[in-house]
Amino acid sequence: MVHSKAEKLFSHYQIFIIAILAFIQFTVILDFMVISPLGAILMDSLKITPSHFGLVVSVYAFSAGASGLITAGFADKFDRKKLILFFYFGFMFGTVLCAIAENFHFLVIARTITGLFGGVISSIGLAIVTDLFPMEVRGRVMGFVQMAFAASQVFGIPIGLVLANKWGWHAPFWMIAGGGMFIGVIMLIFMRPITDHLHAQTRQSAIRHLGKTISRPPYLLSFLTTTLMSTGMFMLAPFGSAFSIHNLGLTFEQLPTLYGITGVFSAIIGPIVGRISDTFGKFRIFWIGSIAGSFMVAIYTHLGLTPLWLVIVVSVLLYTTISSRVISGMALLTAVPDRGDIGAFMSVVSSVRQIAGGVSSVIAGLIVGQAASGLILNYGILGYVVIGSMLLAIVLMYFIDQFVNSKQKAN
């Protein structure tokens, strides 16, 4: 798509929608990520064991994965504005429950409720992107929306930890709930109904709609590809801080610098990658990012004692390549479903991502070991597993690209 300088790429309303979706993603991602850094405070405050804390962390992911499958059947039967408002305010309700939790069992229930509602929000956002933005600019949109991950890492988590250190572990959840309620009211007032997809709906039941969605070969291929796309960082990330300290020789005080600089570069590079994928082709950027990412994974997972500046350079390049494949890959996947299946398709994609992330973490834990000195063992082997999944994803994404091209020619 060629645009003259005088022609605006996005309308003011579309820019508003992009900002809303990015902020929603920011709150959802932050709510999921902030629980891990709070571990030491939580275990001491609630007097729980590490295994209990592991349950607090994992129950969110598994309930989020389950909710994606549960809602997939009727995700296309409602105005998307009403749907995202319902689940977002439910997500805020769960976050408030986390903020008032005073014991382990209450917190587990609160995290389950938060996951049930929060796990669907990302899929509704992807459906809205598919409804409101043509394929030619979805890379740009995905690039901006993906900035939420970097923003939560750079701004959200440090602020949340400062609040937790000053007012207790409940404070970050009050922060998320307060900001989320504000943006929810903005959506309620200014967001327009999104109902065009309802014209493509049939009268089939929610169960039949889900059955059709998970049985179509192109959709199944997309779900499998999503699984492989999700394994990479979910396998490496859980042990990233321990690897940085025990294997690379960094200190705890250096970790905020590492994550902060990496996050800033990720936020800057995301929209650029999105624009490039729209210009040069989403599959092309996906396979280039995957090949480059494979090299960076191999380098990163085999590093020994390394100065901070070099770890930062390698980490920035690693996250850049990973982000490029996620942005271009997800933008390409939005072109797979028919209009009447978009919500259901995205719900299953979201569910698959959550479940794949949980399973990947478990597999990574079986591969990686730790010496008595704290040294992380077999991280290089884990890197090879990640590289294998990245390379296989290229093959599957090739067939998805061929399907999308034939579909667009037919239309």
Image (cartoon, grey):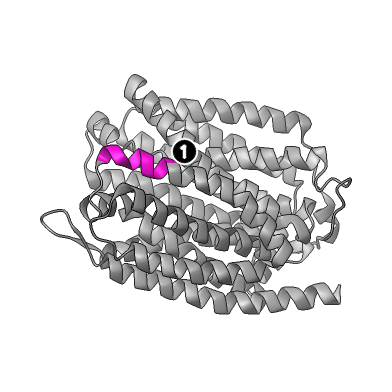
Quadrant of the rendered structure where residue 130 is?
A: bottom right
Q: Residue at x 76, y 66 (%)?
A: 338
Q: Is residue 71 left or right of residue 377?
A: right
* Count of marks overlaid on the render: 1
- At numbered mark 1, what does the secondary structure look like: helix, strand or loop? helix
Q: Residue at x 33, y 53 (%)?
A: 240
Q: Is residue 389 left or right of residue 81?
A: left
Residue 75 visible here: no
What stretch of residues is rendered in magenta?
Answer: 252-260
Amino acid type for the residue under numbered disc 1: Val
The secondary structure making up most of the magenta span is helix
The answer to whether residue 346 is above or below residue 103 is below
Q: Residue at x 57, y 70 (%)?
A: 288
Please provide percent x and percent y for residue 140. 69, 53
Q: Quadrant of the C terminus?
A: bottom right
The answer to whether residue 397 is above or below residue 328 is below
* Residue 348 falls inside the magenta stretch: no
Residue identifier under label 1? 154
The answer to whether residue 77 is above or below residue 378 is above
Q: Nearer the viewer, residue 320 or 379?
A: 320
